[in-house]
Image (tube, rainbow, N blue to C red):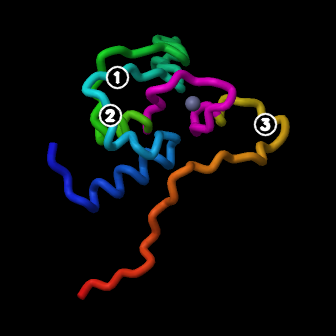
Amino acid sequence: MAIGTRERIELRDELTSVGYHWDYIDEWQPKVTLYRHRAMVTPSGVVVSPVGTPLHNLPGNPDYVSKKTRIGLFTWPPSDSCQCRWCIASKPTTDSVESVETLDGVTPRKRKTRAR
Ligand SMILES: [Zn+2]
């Protein structure tokens, strides 16, 4: 898998924005277990695969994993502290969570774009 620098930055941004570790793009494993953070429900409302179901032996490459985040699959199990939109949506909003954890990496911003 050869991806360009820009794709790589975008992918990293996308991954970190949904809670992946900054280094995921460098340290990914060929096979990962993804956990459902959203139940898989049939159109008739039957839960086929509930929240928390592990799905083993899935490809761990960053572009695959980032696509799966859009349907609620992550490499960590859902928990109370999970900040993904699926978990947040399923939580009762008793009080607003003030302490949003900041990632230890610094999000790269285009500071000096000096093309030529
Ligand atoms: Zn979650």
Mark carried by residue 74: none
Q: Residues within 10 Å of mark 1 (few under 14, many from 20)?
A: some
> Which corner quadrant of the figure contains ligand 1?
top right
Whether the residue carrying mark 3 lies under 8 Å from ligand 1 is answered with no
Residue at x-position 35% and y-position 39%: 67
Q: x, y percentage for residue 86?
A: 57, 33
* Vertical order, 114 against 49 (above or below): below
Q: Secondary structure at mark 3?
A: loop
Residue at x-position 40% and y-position 81%: 112
Amino acid at pointer 3: Thr
Q: Secondary structure at mark 1?
A: strand
Residue 43 in view here: no
Q: Label 1 to label 3, Cα distance in Å? A: 31 Å
Q: Secondary structure at mark 2?
A: loop
Q: Which residue is mark 1?
A: 32
Image quadrant in which the C terminus is located: bottom left
Judged left or right of residue 54, residue 31 is: left
Magenta highlight on residue 75: yes
Q: Which residue is mark 3?
A: 93
Dots 1, 3 in contact, CB < 8 A: no
Dots 2, 3 in contact, CB < 8 A: no
Q: Which residue is mark 2?
A: 28
Residue 38 in view here: yes
Dots 2, 1 in contact, CB < 8 A: yes
Image quadrant in which the N terminus is located: top left
Q: Residues within 10 Å of mark 2 (few under 14, many from 20)?
A: some
Residue at x-position 84% and y-position 35%: 94
Q: Main secondary structure of the magenta part?
A: loop
Judged left or right of residue 110, residue 31 is: left
* Vertical order, 109 against 107 (above or below): below
Between discs 1 and 3, the one toward the N terminus: 1
Q: Which residues are magenta?
A: 70-87
